[in-house]
Image: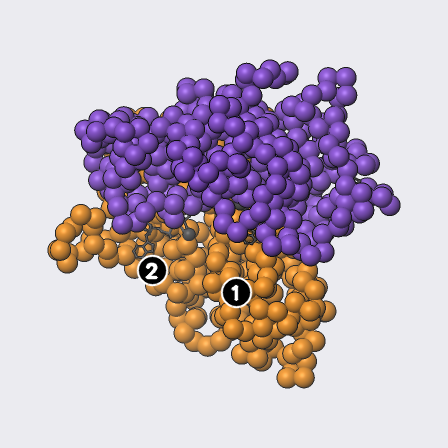
Chain colours: A purple, B orange
Amino acid sequence: MAMTETDTLLTVSDLTLYRGSAKILDHVNLSLARGETLALVGESGAGKSTIAMALMQLLDGARIEGRADLAGAGDLFSLSSRQMVRLRGKRLSMIFQDAGAALNPAYTVGRQLITTLRRNLGLTRPEAYRRAVDLFAQVGINDAEARLSAFPHQLSGGMQQRVMVAIALACNPDLLLADEPTSALDVTIQAQIIRLILSLTRERGASCIFVLHDLALASQSCDRIVVLYAGQVVESGPVAEVLNNHRHPYTRQLKSCVVEIGRADLVAPEGTVPPHDQMPKGCRFSTRCPRALARCSDDAPPPMPANPDRGGPHDHVFACWNPE
Amino acid sequence: MSFLMSSASAPRTEKVPATAPVFELIEVEKVFQVRPPNSGLSRKTVGLRALDGVRLRVDTGTSIALVGESGSGKSTLLRVLLGLDAPTGGRALYHGAPIREARAKGRDFARDVAMVYQDARGSLDPRMTVEALIAEPLRHFNIVQKDQIKARVAELLDRVGLPTDAGRRYAAGLSGGQVRRVAIARALASEPSVLVADEAVSGLDVSTQAQLLTLLRGLQRDMNLTLVFITHDLGVASYLCDEIAIMYLGRIVETGPTDVVLNAPAHPYSAALRAAAPRFFEPMPEPLSGEIPSPLDLPPGCRFSTRCPAAQPDCGERDPQLGRFGAHRAVACLHPLTNPQA
Ligand SMILES: Nc1ncnc2c1ncn2[C@@H]1O[C@H](COP(=O)(O)OP(=O)(O)OP(=O)(O)O)[C@@H](O)[C@H]1O
Ligand SMILES: Nc1ncnc2c1ncn2[C@@H]1O[C@H](COP(=O)(O)OP(=O)(O)OP(=O)(O)O)[C@@H](O)[C@H]1O
Ligand code: SF4
Ligand code: SF4
Ligand SMILES: [Mg+2]
Ligand SMILES: [Mg+2]
């Protein structure tokens, strides 16, 4: 799919992020069209949450280089914190893995939702209340009026996550960031929540970035996928293209770890991600890569198109000197 | 490394006839007294049936997965197996004797049945080095002579795939996957024949999870361990466990060989779980409707009837018990989805 200027919602270019001397993200590029869903996948510590938190400008003690252009708002990284406060909720909002921890235990969930509505949309109390009842119904909470007066601990994990979805979508943002929204929940509830997020964002024409661990779930729920390893994008593109015709050895490794039902032949990868002070200068996967060449550890491979004739940064790209 | 590779050096199993199940639960019930929600200042309590008529048999050397929605009673069942909670009804047996008695009698039970907790980090004393953590059960159960402890710790670290120098570190300096390995090494130190694990691989990324799964499967085979494994990942259950027990609201609703049950679930709840498991490029399934009812307010008849897509009029009247379904399976449903051939 070729993207025109107008349907691009977000473009992240060469995002590099340091904490102290550790380079947590290294020249991350990604783009997202309006209405698209994108999966960020990769092993623990790859930087998935860091990307989401950087876009929300919710990180402390990090130095950021590069840009993140949100249509109509310009580069998020050069906005003042006051400008950012105005965007959060209205243009982009975020859902976290642990809804129980993200909600304030001291207030009823209704009060938290109504506060968001009043602050961001300037609604009166009765207007906000009606809107809240409406939103609870949309996220599938029966008995909405009674549930608004519940405290977070009185709700199950699945219900808490529905409340988070309601709060995040309250002001119709056009970008929703969902950081492992279901990994604390069991599979039946997971399916409910993912479907809910997809249908509500679709209805609103909004885009969604999911941070996920589960490649199969990514294949079911997302249009595009970005595979990260130790802060570098190793492969990205349309989800079917990347997962069925992967080029990067790390994408293969990630796929080989998926334990599908009925699987008997799991071969676990060796080793772990190197610590930041021992990270190779070039390809960060080179310490574990079965296809590594002599140049790999010193020379960082640039993003290359998998289908040069089709081209375009939005298409399938990978970063590897010796692709599969 | 001999003991880690075979069960030949495990003398304790000899006094037990090979045919007796390791664990047998017969109509086990566990009721917690709780204050109902919105009870205000009243001190009145009601009974919460966390386990309700549970029947389960775990044979020597098998691996069984316990799966089911949050709150279905998996952890409670494990606490009963470990003798940490006494059932309020029914019988819970370990090699034919009540678990609580076996546990009270001496160290044999504690030595033979080892546990890996979900919160591995929380279960390890942060002020102890990894070496001290693993040496503790070695000393406590007199597994090896004093001068052999260091060598045995090194063997155990190696067996779970940790570098020897990890022994000098503290839990705080280890990653999530490494902490789980330490917990597994510590559990194996007493040379148990049964390993019980509560969500031992959940919350880890897929590479680390794959490493731990292959480790656990290797251990189970090499040491002929009996494995009781709680997970909510059906892929994990199918990789690691020969048998599966699916729980819903305090009851086991289906058991049998994992592959058979997952290929052709007989209970509609098993089928819903199966359908909800992510599958590559399949459309997202229609999820189960509604919420799990409160255990304080069970629906009449079958406890799954409020959400069951296959419910019939009689389901609201009769409460199906777990009954034989073919040679190796059991199901608690009035209208099972498949024929009991398997
Ligand atoms: N507050 C912090 N201070 C210092 N380093 C941090 C901090 N938060 C994260 N990091 C480091 O940044 C890197 C990326 O972490 P991040 O949380 O983004 O990973 P992730 O991909 O979300 O992993 P997970 O799957 O475990 O959630 C890791 O190396 C981590 O140790
Ligand atoms: N000590 C306790 N006192 C009162 N109620 C309890 C206690 N322990 C468990 N329960 C209740 O018993 C039921 C079963 O809980 P249990 O922890 O066994 O579920 P689970 O299947 O392990 O769930 P999860 O997947 O969330 O760990 C729940 O309704 C729970 O609230
Ligand atoms: S660039 Fe080299 S080390 Fe990196 S993934 Fe490709 S072959 Fe492996
Ligand atoms: S007994 Fe009826 S309601 Fe219960 S699981 Fe079977 S078909 Fe469904
Ligand atoms: Mg994260
Ligand atoms: Mg539990």
Q: Residue lying furthest bottom in this view?
A: B146
Q: Is mark 1 within 8 Å of ligand 6?
A: no
Label disc, if present, on residue B114 of the rendered structure: 1
Label tally = 2
Horizontal and vertical percent position of residue A195: 44, 28
> Is B134 placed above or below A172 here?
below
Q: Residue at x 39, y 65 (%)?
A: B84
Q: Nearer the viewer, residue A228 or B15?
A: A228
Q: Nearer the viewer, residue B287 or B60?
A: B287
Q: Residues within 10 Å of mark 1 (few under 14, many from 20)?
A: many
- Residue on which the image places disc 2: B87
Q: Residue at x 77, y 21 (%)?
A: A308
Q: Amino acid at mark 2?
A: Pro
Horizontal and vertical percent position of residue A216: 58, 33
Q: Residue at x 72, y 20 (%)?
A: A311
Q: Is residue A183 left or right of residue B72?
A: right
Q: Label 1 marks which chain's residue? A: B
Horizontal and vertical percent position of residue B2: 72, 69
Q: Residue at x 49, y 35 (%)?
A: A79
Asked if labels 1 and 2 touch by Cβ distance under 8 angstroms, the answer is: no
- Inspect this view and state whether residue B88 appears: yes
Q: Is residue A300 left or right of residue A197?
A: right
Horizontal and vertical percent position of residue B225: 60, 60
| Mark pair 2, 1: CA separation | 20 Å
Label 2's element? loop
